[in-house]
């Protein structure tokens, strides 16, 4: 599997966009874009990427959620590449609704869909056990305070992620997290649980 980060240094407000390719660009690999971002400059980047002979640069788009900075280019990319579009919410352009525990092929690997409500009701993470890769969208995974308020579904999803084997987290904003990603998630879970416990003890 190859993962190419797009729009990292965008001067336009945009999420990251990640192009997931198979290691050998085989015909049965599924060239997948994780979030479209909102920077049309990524269309020019595709021209310089080897995405396979006779293959569209983008055959599938998966959305971590439907906020504009993560899907701003969706309509344009559909016009250019005619990809299938997977998301939790039934928004315009989505051709496949995916839910918790569904499996998706991205590049040459299988990813598990994890529903992670909290940042938004339709937030998803995508996890590849074989590579230890997590696309986290805008799910809060680096919380260093015990002062927050969290819905039970978020805490449950966070606990699930903390139990996984993770070597790299690709977030919706900022650089990939390669140094101690699982320790960061587990520290976040500990702080979130303390926040929830404090709320319960205070009757909140």
Image: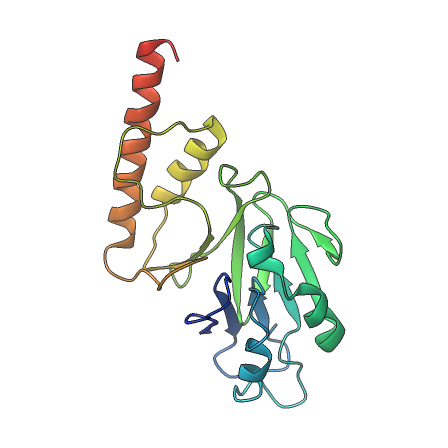
Residue at 47 percent across and 64 percent down: it is: 16
From the image, which quarter does the C terminus lie in?
Answer: top left
Count of marks, rendered view: 0
Q: Is residue 66 visible?
A: yes
135 left or right of 92?
left
Residue at 55 percent across and 78 percent down: it is: 41
How is the model colour-coded?
rainbow
Residue at 53 percent across and 71 percent down: it is: 108
6 relative to 92, above or below? below
153 relative to 39, above or below? above
The one nearer the camera, 95 or 140, is 140
Instruction: Name the image quarter holding residue 134.
Output: bottom left
44 left or right of 194?
right
The one nearer the camera, 66 or 85, is 66
The one nearer the camera, 78 or 163, is 78
Residue 32 position within the rendered picture, expressed as x and y whole percent measured from the top left = 58, 69
Residue at 62 percent across and 80 percent down: it is: 57
Residue 24 position within the rendered picture, expressed as x and y whole percent measured from the top left = 51, 84
191 relative to 5, above or below? above
Instruction: Name the image quarter holding residue 203.
Output: top left
């Amino acid at each position: 599997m190859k993962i190419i980060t797009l729009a990292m240094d965008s001067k336009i407000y945009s999420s990251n966009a990640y192009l997931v390719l198979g290691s050998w660009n085989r015909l049965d690999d599924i060239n997948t874009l994780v979030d479209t971002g909102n920077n049309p400059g990524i269309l020019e980047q595709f021209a310089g990427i080897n995405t396979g002979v006779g293959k569209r640069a983008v055959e599938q788009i998966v959305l971590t959620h439907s906020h504009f900075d993560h899907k701003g280019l969706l309509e344009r990319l559909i016009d250019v590449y005619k990809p299938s579009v997977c998301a939790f919410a039934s928004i315009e352009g989505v051709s496949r609704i995916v839910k918790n525990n569904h499996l998706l092929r991205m590049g040459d690997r299988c990813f598990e869909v994890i529903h992670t409500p909290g940042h938004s009701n339709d937030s998803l993470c995508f996890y590849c056990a074989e590579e230890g890769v997590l696309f986290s969208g805008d799910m809060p995974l680096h919380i260093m305070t015990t002062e927050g308020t969290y819905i039970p579904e978020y805490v449950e999803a966070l606990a699930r992620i903390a139990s996984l084997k993770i070597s790299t987290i690709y977030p919706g904003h900022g650089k990939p997290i390669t140094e101690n990603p699982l320790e960061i998630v587990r520290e976040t879970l500990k702080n979130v649980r303390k926040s929830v416990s404090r709320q319960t003890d205070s009757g909140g």
